[in-house]
Image (cartoon, rainbow, N blue to C red):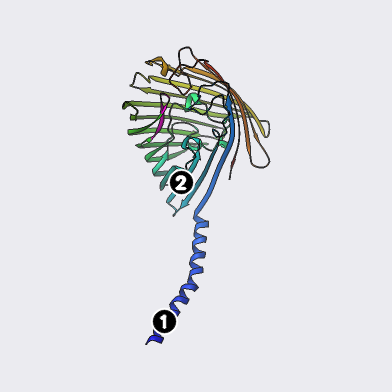
Amino acid sequence: GMKGHYAMENIRQGLRLITLPFLFSSTITWAADHIRFSGFASAGLAISDNEEDYLLSRYNDEINYQSESIFGLQIDTRLNNKVRLSTQLIANQDSDFDVEAEWLYINYQLGPHTEVRSGRLRLPLFSASQYIHVRTSYLWIRPPAEVYNQAPFTRYHGIDIIHRIPFANTDIDLQLYTGKVNDDLWFFGAKVDSESEGLYGINIIAEGDNFSGRITYAVSDFSIHATVPVEIEVDFFSAGFQYEFNKWEIISEYARRNTDLDIIGDTDGAFITLGYSMGDWTPYLTLAVRNSKDNVPPTSDASSDSVTVGMRYDDQYGLTWKMDIHQGNTEDNATGLFTNSTIPEDPRVRLFRLSVSSVF
């Protein structure tokens, strides 16, 4: 009776104790085979000679130790040969250093050259969109704002399909996507919430041995939750290329944003960067311009130009050091790339930035 019951219970507990280490070991083995962690980090400082807030309130004449700081952790989980989960968590000044999921999606491999993704995804509007937070992945401290600030969003919730077409020594990716944006944006000097009613886009990327090119088009209707609610229709076009020859590298990109709202109007911008590799050192020069059209009132006019001279150094410890000096010039009776909606007293700004970055 009772002795038999206790004996059987002891046997069951013994079996649990015996099998638990094996279960734990198999779980660890599965995780090691299927889960990959990677990360990136950057820190630095910046200061300008203009008291007005510049480039989305990141810079003014007080030294800023937070603007170049970012920490990211990426977790990729392969469930089987067809299904993968991916998450990228970041913390930076834009989120007040609260940890946010920059992306969180499930990837399904339909075939050898076709995949479908669903969840929170990176918005593929620019050449550097996929790795924009990984500062070691490009020459600049930050991508030129004349182009990249035209779309204040980096992510959306939705679905995409990507089909790769191998052609000679070039891979061509065709990406179709749709979804919804719900995020904060700067609207006439204030940070407000916005929401898209629909987002549709196409992105085409070509990559070869020493070059890459990209073209994209997207349309969306937005609701901006300002003091007075604003409805706006936006269509967006951009194109860019990167070419390496010998020790030289040339990067250029163009973007145009059209709206049906007079107080914002239409804006286009472009830049060209020329870099020269000297081993671990890479100096570079960037020229950029931005033009606004049909803006009413003129305080929403972002017309401006800039020159940036920078240096990148990759040291023996896996750290990437960057320094640049940027001069921005705002056209008369325009706000340029200053954050506030008032015309700046001094239309010129000189900006100094220093950063150190790493991946792990």
Above-or-below relation of 252 to 4 = above
Residue 87 disc label: 2
Image x and y of residue 3, in percent: 41, 86
Residue depicted at 44% across the width and 50% down the height: 84
Image x and y of residue 337, in percent: 48, 22
Question: What's the amino acid at mark 1?
Answer: Met
**Nearer the observer, 158 or 63:** 63
Helix, strand or loop under label 1:
helix
Q: Residue 188 in magenta? A: yes
Q: Earlier in the sequence, mark 1 or mark 2?
A: 1
Q: State which quarter of the image contains the N terminus.
A: bottom left
Q: CA distance from mark 1 to mark 2?
A: 46 Å
Helix, strand or loop under label 2:
strand
Tell me the mark number nearer the camera, choosing from 1 and 2. Answer: 1
Task: Please identify the dominant SS of the magenta region.
Answer: strand
Q: Quadrant of residue 318?
A: top right
Above-or-below relation of 296 to 241 = above
**Nearer the observer, 254 or 223:** 223
Question: What's the amino acid at mark 2?
Answer: Thr
Q: State which quarter of the image contains the C terminus.
A: top right
Image x and y of residue 285, in percent: 60, 23
Residue 237 disc label: none
Q: Residue 72 in magenta? A: no
**Nearer the observer, 52 or 91:** 52
**Nearer the observer, 290 or 41:** 41
Mark 2: give few (<14), some (14-19) or many (20+) Cα within 10 Å.
Answer: some
Image x and y of residue 74, in percent: 50, 46
Q: Which residues are magenta?
A: 183-190
Mark 1: give few (<14), some (14-19) or many (20+) Cα within 10 Å.
Answer: few
Residue with the mark numbered 1? 8
